[in-house]
Image (tube, coloured by chain):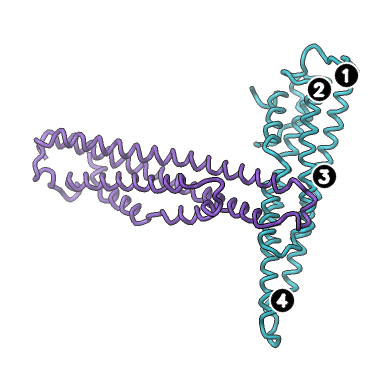
């Protein structure tokens, strides 16, 4: 995904439903772009948390083995404070992701509204000439719903990861958590394809 | 240096060294791009192994019933992508090898066509700035062999990898790194230094 697309370009002569749908498509593109950036940033933070957590459990382990008379190996307070700091950072990332998904929800509502309007204007069989190349309003709505579903599920997973990340002790589970955060299992490859199809259909990408 | 066959042969040798110099740069830059790809391949294998070791139903993530399947799919997908990129890099390396090989075999063909007019003193004659033809032919052959071997060893490593053999994938970056032959690569650079005056001469 390259630079952001302008969501309210005035240069083309589109009006009504087409105008709205084209703007929504640009919004989808920009939201997904921002999501990717947040995900990358969140991954860095999550990696820090895991490293701190592993180091902490290691040093605790060492302290248990060491003689009681020895002073603590590491001032535990410092690492707890940094751990808390990183967790707060991750929480911030998560909050921003929640805001993105809220915006996505609004896009779906808008798309649903357009569908209903189209049905009201042109009846069940829809308009005679397509909005852009071939898709009808229902198709646009279906794509939006699919995108939203993916990101809602992914957001739920992120929420769970945020809760567990700093409380996990086994290193395998740590790796699984990081893998989940990075690879986004609930965002299938089709999401990317659908977005590109949406941009092609609405003319943001040249055919 | 009065023999008629000497001048064209020297020209051809000069062209081969120029080709070698350009291709050595390409080779190095492609290899530099392979390193990070191999590291991420190892990381992905590690992630897959971790997923196999963890019983997700015993963790708080059990609320996502299809998580394991989806994550497994994404991991395989990412491994496929990296292997695909590595294949592209290998074809760049292959074209480096081919272009060096073609140049060198061209020079040797020219040499063999003219063996009758090239006697031993001519072939071994050298000056302060021009190494002897026999030395330069040897260096070209060494370089050709070096890139052939390097390419084959890397190709072999990649061909033994399988997307479902995780431990093999995990150790791949280490084995890839162990294929590095800095001394052989330095020798090529040395050779290029030795012929630098010859290359600049008209």
Q: Tell me, yes or no, whether dots 3 and 1 are on the same chain.
A: yes
Q: Which mark is residue A75?
A: 4
The secondary element bearing badge 3 is classed as: helix
Q: Tell me, yes or no, whether dots 4 and 3 are on the same chain.
A: yes
User: Are the two marked residues, 2 and 3, in contact with CB atoms closer than 8 angstroms?
Assistant: no
Q: Which chain is purple?
A: B
Q: Which mark is residue A137?
A: 2
Picture residue at 34% right of the left edge, 45% below the top: B147
Instruction: State which chain disc 1 sits on.
Output: A
Q: Is residue A19 left or right of residue B71?
A: right
User: Are the two marked residues, 4 and 2, in contact with CB atoms closer than 8 angstroms?
Assistant: no
* Upstream in sequence: badge 2 or badge 1: 1
| Mark 1 surroundings within 10 Å by alpha-carbon count, few (fewer than 14), some (14 through 19), many (20 or more) | some
Q: Tell me, yes or no, whether dots 2 and 1 are on the same chain.
A: yes
Q: CA distance from mark 4 to mark 3?
A: 37 Å
Single out the mark in the foreground, 4 or 2: 2
């Amino acid at each position: 995904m390259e630079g952001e697309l302008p969501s309210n370009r005035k240069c083309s002569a589109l009006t009504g439903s087409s105008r709205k749908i084209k703007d929504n498509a640009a919004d989808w593109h920009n939201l997904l772009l921002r999501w990717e950036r947040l995900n990358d940033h969140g991954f860095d933070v999550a990696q820090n948390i895991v490293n701190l957590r592993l180091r902490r459990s290691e040093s605790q382990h060492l302290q248990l083995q060491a003689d009681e008379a020895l002073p603590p190996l590491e001032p535990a307070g410092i690492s707890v404070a940094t751990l808390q700091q990183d967790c707060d950072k991750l929480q911030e990332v998560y909050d921003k992701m929640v805001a993105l998904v809220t915006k996505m929800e609004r896009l779906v509502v808008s798309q649903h509204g357009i569908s209903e309007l189209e049905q009201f204007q042109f009846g069940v069989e829809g308009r005679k000439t397509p909005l852009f190349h071939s898709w009808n309003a229902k198709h646009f709505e279906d794509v939006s719903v699919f995108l939203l579903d993916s990101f809602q599920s992914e957001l739920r997973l992120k929420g769970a990861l945020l809760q567990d990340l700093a409380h996990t002790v086994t290193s395998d589970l740590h790796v699984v958590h990081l893998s989940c955060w990075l690879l986004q299992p609930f965002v299938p490859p089709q999401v990317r394809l659908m977005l590109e199809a949406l941009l092609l259909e609405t003319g943001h990408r040249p055919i | 240096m009065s023999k008629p066959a000497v001048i064209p042969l020297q020209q051809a040798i000069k062209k081969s060294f120029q080709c070698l110099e350009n291709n050595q740069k390409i080779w190095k830059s492609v290899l530099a791009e392979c390193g990070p790809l191999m590291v991420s391949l190892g990381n992905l294998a590690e992630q897959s192994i971790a997923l196999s070791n963890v019983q997700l139903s015993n963790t708080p993530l059990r609320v996502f019933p299809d998580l394991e399947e989806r994550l497994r799919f994404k991991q395989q997908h990412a491994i496929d992508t990296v292997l695909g990129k590595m294949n592209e890099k290998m074809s760049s390396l292959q074209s480096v090898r081919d272009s060096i090989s073609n140049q060198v075999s061209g020079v040797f063909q020219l040499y063999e066509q003219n063996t009758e007019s090239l006697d031993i003193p001519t072939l071994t004659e050298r000056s302060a700035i021009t190494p002897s033809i026999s030395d330069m032919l040897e260096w070209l052959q060494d370089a050709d062999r070096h890139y052939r071997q390097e390419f084959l060893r890397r190709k072999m490593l990649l061909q033994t990898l399988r997307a479902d053999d995780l431990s093999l994938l995990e150790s791949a970056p280490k084995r890839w790194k162990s294929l590095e032959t800095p001394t052989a690569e330095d020798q090529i650079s040395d050779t290029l230094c030795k012929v630098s005056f010859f290359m600049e001469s008209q």
